[in-house]
Image (cartoon, rainbow, N blue to C red):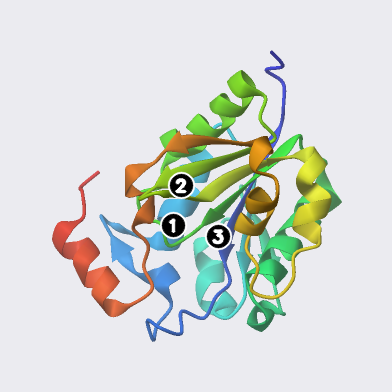
Amino acid sequence: MNLSRTTSLIILAAGESSRLGQPKQQLMFNGANLLQRAIEAGLDSDCDTITVVVGAYHERLTPYIDPTSVELCLNQEWKKGMASSIKQGMNTVLRNTVPNQVIIMLCDQPFVDKDIINQLIHFQRESNKSIVACTYQGTVGAPVLFDQKFFPHLLKLKGKEGAKKIFIDFPDQVGAISFPLGHIDIDTKDDYQALLRDGIKD
């Protein structure tokens, strides 16, 4: 077992939150906004580097990002879809280092914490799977870990394609951890109100 593998975390926070009508990244939950919670989870985890990809609301979000601990990546092509943010994040990571693996994380899953991130890393070490995703409500999804050999596939994603396309294409390479609260994300005002009403306290 190689315990010296390096892991880079990429937090995607570039979207315009069109269905919500305001930046979801700034929504407050349990004393912090969703972007701050995502960054805190990354900083508390076993990840070696953290890159935050911003786009539509970069001027509003930049104040929440400490450049001494987190790498800021501006995706000026955010309108093209999630693939552009993944590629920009990957290119930023690879300019600085070549990690053994990356974790792609969304900033609007409020229950992603350091434990979930660490479970992805530890499961990869134990299973030697090249992709480790989360399972919830009968599906697999983010956050998801990719071994270095899948970096070229991440860089080839197009348009609105997310990383899920890759683990659909390579099912035999995929391991999974259980994350029952992973299905909770914030796309609409109703989603947010439900989170505030029913959300599990930290």
Q: Label 2, on which residue?
A: 40
Q: Residues within 10 Å of mark 3 (few under 14, many from 20)?
A: some
Helix, strand or loop for disc 1: helix
Mark 2 / mark 3, whichever is N-terminal: 2
Q: Label 1, on which residue?
A: 36
Looking at the image, which residue is at 21% across and 49% down? 200
In the displayed structure, 111 sits above or below 4; it is below
Q: Amino acid at mark 3?
A: Ile
In the image, 198 versus 141, the foreground residue is 141
Please tell me in which quadrant of the rendered image residue 194 appears: bottom left
Quarter of the picture holding the C terminus: top left
Q: Amino acid at mark 2?
A: Glu
In the displayed structure, 54 sits above or below 101; it is below
Looking at the image, which residue is at 54% across and 34% down? 120
Are discs 2 and 1 less than 8 Å apart at CB? Answer: yes
Q: Which mark is residue 65?
A: 3
